Image (spheres, rainbow, N blue to C red):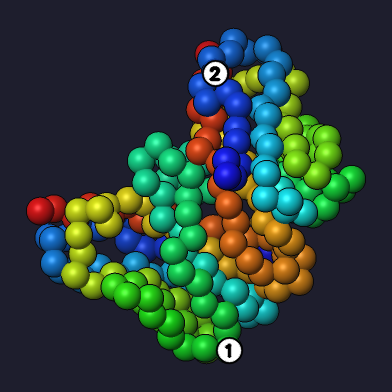
Amino acid sequence: GENVEQHPSTLSVQEGDSAVIKCTYSDSASNYFPWYKQELGKGPQLIIDIRSNVGEKKDQRIAVTLNKTAKHFSLHITETQPEDSAVYFCAASRSGYSTLTFGKGTMLLVSP
Amino acid sequence: NAGVTQTPKFQVLKTGQSMTLQCAQDMNHNSMYWYRQDPGMGLRLIYYSASEGTTDKGEVPNGYNVSRLNKREFSLRLESAAPSQTSVYFCASIRDMIIGELFFGEGSRLTVL
């Protein structure tokens, strides 16, 4: 089955800095890579996703990049703000009635 | 819209007791999931239901049973709770399993003494 490794497990940055979280996956047939944000006491919520037919996707301060050859993808957050503090999960799956496999999560702390 | 609603939010059990976690979604989604979240372990899939009338095991099904009661409701039962089942449980739903956004409930924190 799929295995998703996520690094780092914790990340502390100053407000305004950039943050990068990296994930690798094992199943070369995986073609869907979402990122979820979990705020304290809440359930995870989708913030951005990418499919294997594109290499990069941006949404305001958030971007995701995908390298299918190396089987890794990354989340980039620019101009971080205190409200970006949360746990972020990457995930991977195949299309067509497949379940998501999640990484272990990264706790991001943005200090004012 | 309530989205995905889980009950109870908190529960304390003694070893060997049984209980059922309830989940309901009001988005007319076909597929529903139960995950558990433990520190340093991420989200691990317990069981899922691709559509009404079907259920399948996930990564960590031992000690659990599920029932897809109807399209809206998917319950998780612990028949004989063990301390290893102390965790935060999340229910989630998706329109269908062919790539889309998972919508999560707010979680149920279970402690087994």
Q: Which residue is mark 1?
A: A53
Within 10 angstroms of label 1, few (less than 14), some, or many (20 or more) residues?
few
Judged left or right of residue A33, residue A22 is: left
Q: Quadrant of the N terminus of chain A?
A: bottom right
- The residue positioned 42% from the left and 45% from the top of the image is B40
Using the rendered view, name the quadrant where residue B25 is placed.
top right
Q: Secondary structure at mark 1?
A: loop
Q: Which residue is mark 2?
A: B11
- The residue positioned 53% from the left and 15% from the top of the image is B12
Q: Find the residue positioned furthest to the front.
A: B1
Amino acid beneath label 2: Gln
Find the distance from the CA under tag 1 to the CA under tag 2. 44 Å
Judged left or right of residue B12, residue A83 is: left
Chain assignment, label 2: B
Q: Position of residue B75 (x, y in %)?
A: 73, 33
- The residue positioned 36% from the left and 63% from the top of the image is A7
Using the rendered view, name the quadrant where residue B18 is placed.
top right
- The residue positioned 49% from the left and 60% from the top of the image is A46
Amino acid beneath label 1: Asn
Please tell me whether residue B67 is drawn above or below residue A60 in the rendered image: above
Q: Are marks 1 and 2 on the same chain?
A: no
